[in-house]
Amino acid sequence: MIHSAEEWARMLFVPLYQEKFLQTIWNTPDPMRQQEGWRLKSGKWSPWFFNMRPLGDSPELFFNCCVAMADLISEHEDVDVITAVEMAGINLSGGMAVVSRSLLSIPRRIAYTRPLPKKVRTPEEAAELFSQFDEGVAGYGQKEFIEGRLLDGDRVAIFDDMATNLGSKIIARLTVLWMAKQMGISVTCNKIFYFLNRERENRQRGLDFAKRTEPGLYPEPLHAHYVIEFDDHFPDLNGIMHPEEFQVISDFQRDDSGRFQDKGEQQRVLALAAKTRQD
């Protein structure tokens, strides 16, 4: 190991904001996001977003993030193949595998998921879709939804850039398990690795997945591991962000009432950000 996850988080969090991979309605260069904010996969509106897809534009930061992920995964010997969630996890997983071999002398097999033929937003919707595949519903041909090789007995881990509520990671896990079933092999998939965590409850949320009763979800404890806990390191941006920007994001992270899901509140903070950019 080169650095602990906490050490990497302290080194990387502020640069990720300064180079606009951590974007807010204040610092984003995208006019549409300035006017609308973001709608997460969960359906939740947000005034900030973490986007590692263009991270290759910053070679030094990309390299350090890949090393941080390789470091994180190096603590887990019981992983045979890392399966990235398309699209954001793909470039990071490739870089991670290279530095894992070159710097840590740990070779890593990697794969990635492909889009399903129908957009699904929840694990329940994904399980229903896979059941339709099993039943031979018209319109769904047999496709490969994993690019890479799965072998009998593989211990598979899911890999991504960030998590809001683990939903997309669980969908990727269902894809892995369904593909393994089609191939007539047995694999396990109960670890999830990603770079930034949006909601502190995710570790417990993963463990509580074992309590689900739907067999199509393959319930078991899921172990979430990540480099940066957003809420722990957000205070590092105090004095770097505009004061009103820092306050709004701080309030959003603490909001349990659904206040920021109200259209009127969204328009208020969007107007505040627009005024600040003009001043």
Image (cartoon, helix red, strand yellow):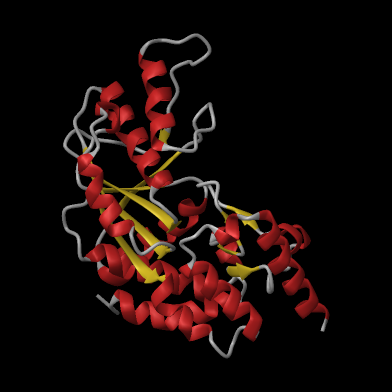
Does residue 152 show up?
A: yes
The residue furthest bottom is 239
Q: Nearer the viewer, residue 272 or 147?
A: 272
Residue drawn at (40%, 83%) of the image: 10
Residue drawn at (41%, 52%) of the image: 165
The residue furthest right is 278
Coordinates of residue 87 in the picture (x, y in percent): 52, 48
Examine the image and state in which quarter residue 174 appears.
top left
Looking at the image, residue 58 sits to the left or right of residue 180; the answer is: right
Q: Nearer the viewer, residue 228 or 101?
A: 228
Examine the image and state in which quarter residue 179 appears.
top left
148 shown above or below 49: above
Quadrant where the image shows the N terminus: bottom left
Residue drawn at (47%, 83%) of the image: 235
Coordinates of residue 233 in the picture (x, y in percent): 43, 79
Residue drawn at (48%, 36%) of the image: 114
Quadrant where the image shows the C terminus: bottom right
Examine the image and state in which quarter residue 55 appears.
bottom right
Does residue 155 show up?
A: no
Looking at the image, residue 127 sits to the left or right of residue 81; the answer is: right
Coordinates of residue 244 in the picture (x, y in percent): 65, 81
Q: Nearer the viewer, residue 248 or 59?
A: 248
Coordinates of residue 250 in the picture (x, y in percent): 52, 75
Looking at the image, residue 245 sits to the left or right of residue 167; the answer is: right
81 shown above or below 279: above
107 shown above or below 129: below
Looking at the image, residue 18 sits to the left or right of residue 35; the answer is: left
Q: How many marks?
A: 0
